[in-house]
């Protein structure tokens, strides 16, 4: 990544206002006066935070397996998938605290290229953010998306957030486990956010909808046909015929219900 050039204007700490003197190519810096950690984006200085991990590798694997066994993925994905790779890093996000419709709202935008766009929907409580530490540099993914680009995404989103609505801007590194797994000759990626254990994925082997739609369609068609029986009996203008039609409808419905339930259970067990 090309490091931003040193600006010709004075850089001052966003916390105490002290002048900062970064070395050439330096983008992460600690204020010598107040010890705040900041990030240099061209001529901008913003707070630099990180989110401390609470989930270790074993627990992250467990969270991934639990997600694979959930209702969104294909049956027994946790047993059929094959883990082919994993990695841990602190991934950068642009953090915007905004005033929208008289409420404080936090928006997140990726500060580096990533395929899992669900990161935008993470919840990062301000109380859990800590000052970034230089010891994390070896595991930290360097930002590559300029602040101006993230601000543009924010202004083009829904709702549209203009610069005057932004109360606070920061760079936050969040702990992520990246898992790659194989299923039916395809490789997929899932993320486990290591502060909350939340699993994120854009593309994954999802449950097939067709069997469920067929089962629902057969059920609807069956009961629609049964509903026609009393209508036909009523059309005969004969009380006895209507009574027989109602009895037939009820009897056939009682017989059809367990069969349809068994079909639905079979689909749920196989798909």
Image (cartoon, rainbow, N blue to C red):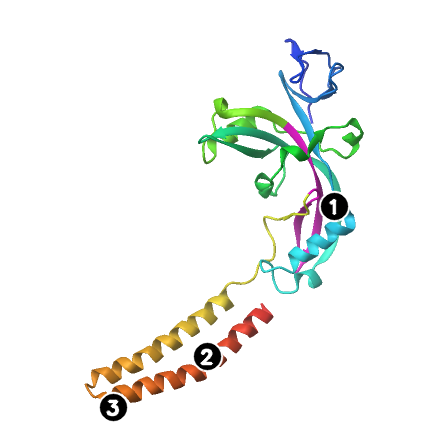
Secondary-structure class at tag 3:
helix
Q: Earlier in the sequence, mark 2 or mark 3?
A: 3
State whether residue 205 is above or below residue 265.
above
Rate crowding at label 1 as few (under 14), some (14 to 19) or many (20 or more) other CA atoms within 10 Å.
some
Q: Quadrant where the C terminus lies?
A: bottom right
Rate crowding at label 2 as few (under 14), some (14 to 19) or many (20 or more) other CA atoms within 10 Å.
some
State whether residue 26 is above or below residue 269.
above
Displayed quadrant of residue 96: top right
Displayed quadrant of residue 168: top right
Task: Between residue 112 and residue 103, name the one nearer to us.
Answer: 103
State whether residue 18 is above or below residue 103.
above
Task: Between residue 200 and residue 47, name the one nearer to us.
Answer: 47
In-image side of 145 versus 158 (left or right): right
Counting from the top left corner in percent of width and height, residue 252 is at: 40, 85
Residue 38 makes an appearance in the image: yes
Mark 2 vs 3: CB contact within 8 A? no
Residue drawn 61% across and 62% down?
74
Mark 3 vs 1: CB contact within 8 A? no
Counting from the top left corner in percent of width and height, residue 234 is at: 23, 82
Q: Earlier in the sequence, mark 2 or mark 1?
A: 1
Residue drawn 38% across and 76% down?
223
Rate crowding at label 3 as few (under 14), some (14 to 19) or many (20 or more) other CA atoms within 10 Å.
few
| Region rendered in magenta | 171-195
Q: Provide the residue designation for mark 2.
A: 257
Q: Provide the residue designation for mark 1.
A: 55
Real-space CA distance between mark 3 and mark 1, rounded to the nearest whole angstrom: 70 Å
Q: Earlier in the sequence, mark 3 or mark 1?
A: 1
Real-space CA distance between mark 2 and mark 3, rounded to the nearest whole angstrom: 26 Å
Real-space CA distance between mark 2 and mark 1, rounded to the nearest whole angstrom: 46 Å
């Amino acid at each position: 990544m090309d490091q931003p050039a040193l600006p010709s204007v004075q850089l001052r700490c966003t916390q105490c206002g002290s002048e900062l003197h970064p070395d050439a190519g330096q983008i992460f810096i600690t204020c010598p006066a107040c010890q705040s950690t900041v990030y240099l984006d061209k001529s901008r200085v913003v707070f630099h935070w990180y989110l401390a991990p609470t989930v270790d590798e074993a627990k992250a694997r467990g969270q991934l397996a639990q997600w694979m066994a959930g209702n969104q993925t294909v049956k027994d994905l946790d047993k059929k998938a094959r883990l082919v790779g994993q990695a841990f890093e602190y991934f950068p996000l642009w953090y915007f605290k905004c005033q929208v419709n008289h409420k404080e709202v936090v928006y997140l935008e990726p500060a580096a290229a990533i395929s899992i766009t669900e990161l935008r929907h993470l919840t990062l409580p301000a109380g859990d953010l800590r000052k970034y530490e230089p010891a994390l540099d070896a595991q930290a993914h360097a930002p590559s998306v300029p602040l101006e680009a993230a601000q543009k995404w924010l202004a083009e989103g829904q709702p549209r957030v203009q610069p005057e609505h932004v109360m606070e801007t920061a760079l936050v590194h969040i702990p992520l486990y990246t898992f790659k797994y194989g299923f039916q000759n395809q490789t997929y990626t899932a993320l486990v956010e290591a502060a909350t254990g939340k699993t994120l994925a854009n593309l994954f082997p999802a449950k097939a909808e067709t069997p469920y739609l067929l089962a629902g369609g057969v059920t609807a068609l069956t009961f629609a046909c049964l509903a026609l029986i009393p209508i036909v009996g009523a059309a005969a203008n004969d009380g006895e015929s209507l009574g027989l039609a109602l009895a037939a409808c009820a009897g056939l419905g009682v017989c059809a219900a367990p069969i349809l339930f068994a079909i639905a259970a079979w689909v749920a067990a196989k798909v």
